[in-house]
Image (cartoon, coloured by chain):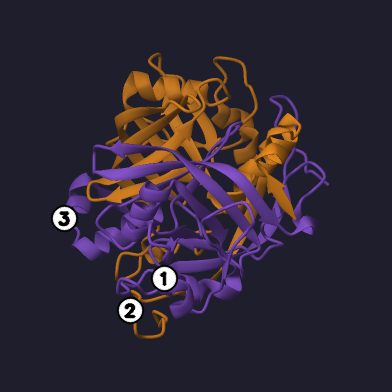
Chain colours: A purple, B orange
Amino acid sequence: MLFNASDIANMEQRYRANFINALSGFKSANLIGTISKSGQHNLAIVSSVFHIGAHPPLMGMIMRPHTVPRDTLQNIKDTGVYTINHVGIEHTREAHHTSARFAEGVSEFEHVGLTPWLSDSHPAPFVAESRLKIGLELQDIQIIALNNTELVIGQVVEVNVDKHAVAADGYIAIDRLNTAAVSGLDAYHSTNTIGRYQYAKADAPVQNIE
Amino acid sequence: MLFNASDIANMEQRYRANFINALSGFKSANLIGTISKSGQHNLAIVSSVFHIGAHPPLMGMIMRPHTVPRDTLQNIKDTGVYTINHVGIEHTREAHHTSARFAEGVSEFEHVGLTPWLSDSHPAPFVAESRLKIGLELQDIQIIALNNTELVIGQVVEVNVDKHAVAADGYIAIDRLNTAAVSGLDAYHSTNTIGRYQYAKADAPVQNIE
């Protein structure tokens, strides 16, 4: 079935939001932990975290200034630090709950039933239940002028992960950590591994990494 | 296990690439179809496609100018159009093969065994085997100065998708299209749906969408 530009422009707003949000494919499921200037913890689910580069280790995420994670964005701007925590398939409901509009002064951690965890070396709170926890320092915020969203870029300064999930070549088997995937605005998924493939060569078939 | 900033900086280059690429969580698996000024088709797998906004419908992807999809980036700059095609779990091997360094003048479509498909209204080639095909027009390219990658932003101008996968509220059940997910640099995954959750409210438990 073909949807053209005019069909998309004429979609009802919520219909279009569901439709367009599903187009990119599977998305990461992460909880962003921050702390306000006054010391209040904040937690928000974000499905827009993505890889930017390995050296330096940079991660990006798209933030909409006028939607729910606005406290998250303000805290990052104020303190320069935040955490990214994988959402496990057993915690998707609690994670989704963080997207509600809580009153100021309410910690989403307590309200949804997740536990803040502080490392010795990073001021922003991690999620204790998360099996892959990343501490970041803000490097840059770029405005995307086309729709006034903000691309937040941070450098990874600490990673806490189950040792058994890290392969000999550095790959982290995030399926073995039960990390969830997201599609659209509100769908959560578990995963099964098809395989890892070796670096592809033009004139040879693709080989599995055993 | 804790990896701090110094541990990460001291990782062997390939180890670090595997490790850092896995941190963001599950990623989208998409084939980017382009056409050169001289009419040559090009196809490249990219795991960095992400949602930027629904209205206008904008999608982004991070391109590294000096790695394999450089023809893709050049074609997009030259022609202003490209396609994004979901990779199905049955075509991950062919899709991964597009990341090899093919000689100039070789069409990755033919070489890896995928079929170009042209719509009446879009000049860039789609992937016939893909069950969700998106036509885009380039809107902007923003340089990420921190590591000289390029954020390519396109507007969705056409979507071809199996009608049965589009729910009444606009959500596209991409798991029913057998869309694959990626982790790290080279791991491919199928998915199982846990559920869709309703818009979250502060003082009520999260409810499933039936």
Q: Earlier in the sequence, mark 3 or mark 1?
A: 3
Amino acid type at mark 3? Asn
Label 2: how many residues lie within 10 Å, few (<14), some (14-19) or many (20+)? some
Label 3: how many residues lie within 10 Å, few (<14), some (14-19) or many (20+)? few
Specify the subunit that label 1 lies on.
Answer: A
Same chain assignment for discs 1 and 2:
no
Residue B138: image x %, image y %? Answer: 31, 31
- Left or right position of B1 against A120: right
Q: Residue at x 82, y 45 (%)?
A: A168
Q: Residue at x 68, y 43 (%)?
A: B19
User: How many labels were placed on the picture?
Assistant: 3
- Left or right position of B209 against B23: left
Same chain assignment for discs 2 and 3:
no
Disc number placed over residue B201 in the picture, else none:
2
Amino acid type at mark 2? Lys
Same chain assignment for discs 3 and 1:
yes
Element under disc 2:
loop
Separation of marks 3 and 1 at Cα, in angstroms: 31 Å
Residue A182: image x %, image y %? Answer: 48, 62
Disc number placed over residue A98 in the picture, else none:
1
Instruction: Work out whether A19 lies above or below B182.
Output: below
Element under disc 3:
loop
Q: Quadrant of residue A118?
A: bottom right
Marks 2 and 3 close (CB-CB < 8 Å): no
Amino acid type at mark 1? Thr
Disc number placed over residue A10 in the picture, else none:
3
Report the front residue among B174 and A205.
B174
Q: Nearer the viewer, mark 2 or mark 3?
A: 2
Instruction: Work out whether B125 lies above or below A68.
Output: above
Separation of marks 2 and 3 at Cα, in angstroms: 29 Å
